[in-house]
Image (spheres, grey):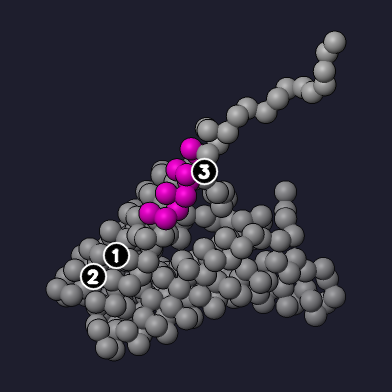
Amino acid sequence: MLKHHAPGWVYAGGMLLSAVAGCVNAVAVGSAYHAVTHMSGTVFAVSAELAHGNRVVAMRAAAVVVSFFVGATFSGFLIRQQSLHAGRRYGVALMIEGVLLTGAWLGLRANHVSGEVLAAMACGLQNALATSYSGAVLRTTHMTGVVTDLGIAIGHWLAREPIEWFRVRLHLVLLLGFTSGGAMGAFGFSVLGATTLLVPSLTVFVAGVAYTIQRQVQRRGHAASPPASVGSGNTR
């Protein structure tokens, strides 16, 4: 069933994750010249490099695509839900993403292909965390679908068709997050280089720990609460 609003945690989480992806992509492009948050350009790079006989470069780009796929596959195995739903193992997934991004930092710092591969795997995992919320498609690592859905909404508005404004707000938040994260990542890379990747790495890891602790506290609270009474009234 479609909802006509989204709770605050959906907006906050979406903006945080899209900002992380923007930052990661800025660092990856600056370090290795390959986008790791979206695969269209990288898949094209495989085709183009093969056409020009650059097999080594093509294989490197292909490794990035495969790694993104592996990350998404692992996320699907771990989360086992296509819709965003509180209570799933998002905390574990975010902590794993933080570890992968730390490994990516080490690889990029050493100018090794493992940097691109691990960054792409982390982004594939993140992008598959939740594919939709109440009918709104959620993609936090690339903005093609977001911009498309915004364009469709504006077209409907111009045609005086009804619009679910909560979707527009949600997609604007994702776009703002990715843009802000990309700007911070580009600036950070110009100053710190690949070390900038430690910022999103620490961010998602801490978010994963906080989410896991919160879920544990909620479960203990539910377990400690007395069961609800079946009926009420006095018998005489």
Q: Which amino acid does label 1 sit on?
A: Leu
- Disc 2 on helix, strand or loop? helix
Label 2 amino acid? Trp
Judge from the rendering whether residue 177 lies leftward or rightward of residue 148; answer left or right.
left
Q: Distance between the residues labelled 3 and 2?
A: 34 Å
Where does label 2 land, which residue? Answer: 105
Question: Which residue is pictured at 32% across the width and 66% down the height?
Answer: 201
In the image, the segment drawn in magenta is 209-220
- Viewer-nearest residue: 217 or 82: 217
Instruction: Please tell me whether the stretch drawn in magenta is mainly helix, strand or loop.
Output: helix
Residue 107 lies in what quarter of the image?
bottom left
Q: Are marks 3 and 2 in contact (CB under 8 Å)?
A: no
Element type where label 1 sits in the image: helix
* Label 1 with label 3: CB-CB less than 8 Å: no
- Measured as percent of width and height from the top left, residue 80 is found at 48, 43
Kind of residue at badge 3: Gln
The disc placed on residue 218 is: 3
Q: Which residue is drawn at 54% across and 56% down?
A: 131
Query: Which residue bears the numbered disc 1?
Result: 101
Q: Where is residue 208 in the image (x, y as percent from the top left)?
A: 40, 55
Image coords of residue 170 (percent x, y): 62, 68
